[in-house]
Amino acid sequence: MSKLTAIISLVLKNCKLELLIIVLGILCINLPWDLSGIAKILSGYFEESRCSGIAGVASVIIGIYVTVWSIFATSASKINAELLKNRVEGQLFFLIAIGLGEAFITTVLCVFIPQEIPHYPELIALLTTLTSASFLKFVILIMMITKLNIKYIVQEIDIQNAICTETQIKLDEIYQRTVDGKSKF
C-alpha cells in the first residue's frame, strides 16, 4: 500500500498542470454547454493534414525524450551524481515517462483512430495541449539541469586552474633555486 501512496504522491507532485488540463478537458466535453460551434471549429481545424503534423511533432518529442533518457541513463558524470543526491532523477524520469505516454497516445490517436469517433477534435486538442505542456516542463527542467551542469563545469575549470597555478609556482620555485644555485658557483 505504501508503494501506491508513493506513486500517487509522485503523480500529484509532478502532474498538477496535466491533471488540471485533463479535468478542464473533461468538463468541456461533458458539461451541458452548447459547444457545437467550438466543436465544429475544432473539427475543421484538426483535419487530416493537421493531425499528421501533430503526429509528426509528437514523434519528434518522443525521440527527444528517448534521447535524453538514454544520455542520462548511460552517462556517469558529476551532474548525474548530483541529480541522484538531490533525488531529481526520479522527477526527470517520471516527467519523461509521462511525456512519452502522452506523445505516444497523441500519435496513435492522430494516426490510427478515425476522425468520426465522438469528441475526436476535443480529444486531439486535449492531448496536444497535454503533450505541449509536458514537453515545456521537460525543457524547463533540462534547462535547470544544464545551468547546474555549467556551474559544475566552471568549478572544475577553477580547480584545474588552481592546480595549474600551484604547479607553475612550484616549477618557478624549483627553477629559481636551480638558477640561484648555478649563479653561486
Image (cartoon, grey):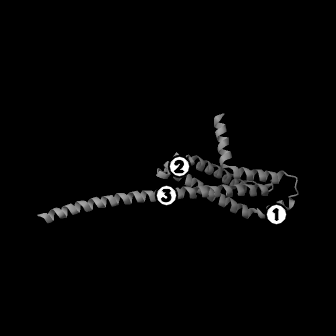
Which label's residue is closer to the chain start, 2 or 3? Answer: 2
**What residue sits 57% from the left and 48% below the top?**
88
Task: Work out which residue is located at the far top of the displayed protein and give it.
Answer: 1
| Residue indicated by mark 1 | 41
Q: Earlier in the sequence, mark 1 or mark 2?
A: 1
Name the residue located 49 percent from the left edge and 59 percent from the top edge. Answer: 150
Going from N to C along the chain, the mark reached first, 3 or 1, is 1
Q: Please, what is the three-letter code of the amino acid marked with disc 1? A: Ile
Q: Secondary structure at mark 2?
A: helix
Which residue is at the front of the view, 173 or 62? 173
Could you say whether the residue bearing mark 1 is in a helix, strand or loop? Answer: helix
Image-quadrant location for residue 185: bottom left
Residue 151 is marked as: 3
Residue 70, horizontal then vertical, whole percent? 54, 51
Could you tell me the amino acid type at mark 2? Leu
Let me know if residue 63 appears in the view: no
- In the image, taking residue 45 as reference, residue 181 lies left or right, namely left
Tags 2 and 3 touching, CB below 8 Å: no
Where in the figure is residue 13, as x and y percent of width and height?
Answer: 66, 47
Between tags 3 and 1, which lies in front?
3
Residue placed under numbered mark 2 in the picture: 83
Q: Residue 131 or 87: which is nearer the viewer?
A: 87
**Residues at marks 1 and 2, CA–CA distance in whole angstroms:** 45 Å
**Tag 1–tag 2 contact (CB < 8 Å):** no
Furthest residue toward bottom:
183
**Spatial separation of the CA atoms under disc 2 and disc 3:** 14 Å
Which picture quadrant has residue 44?
bottom right
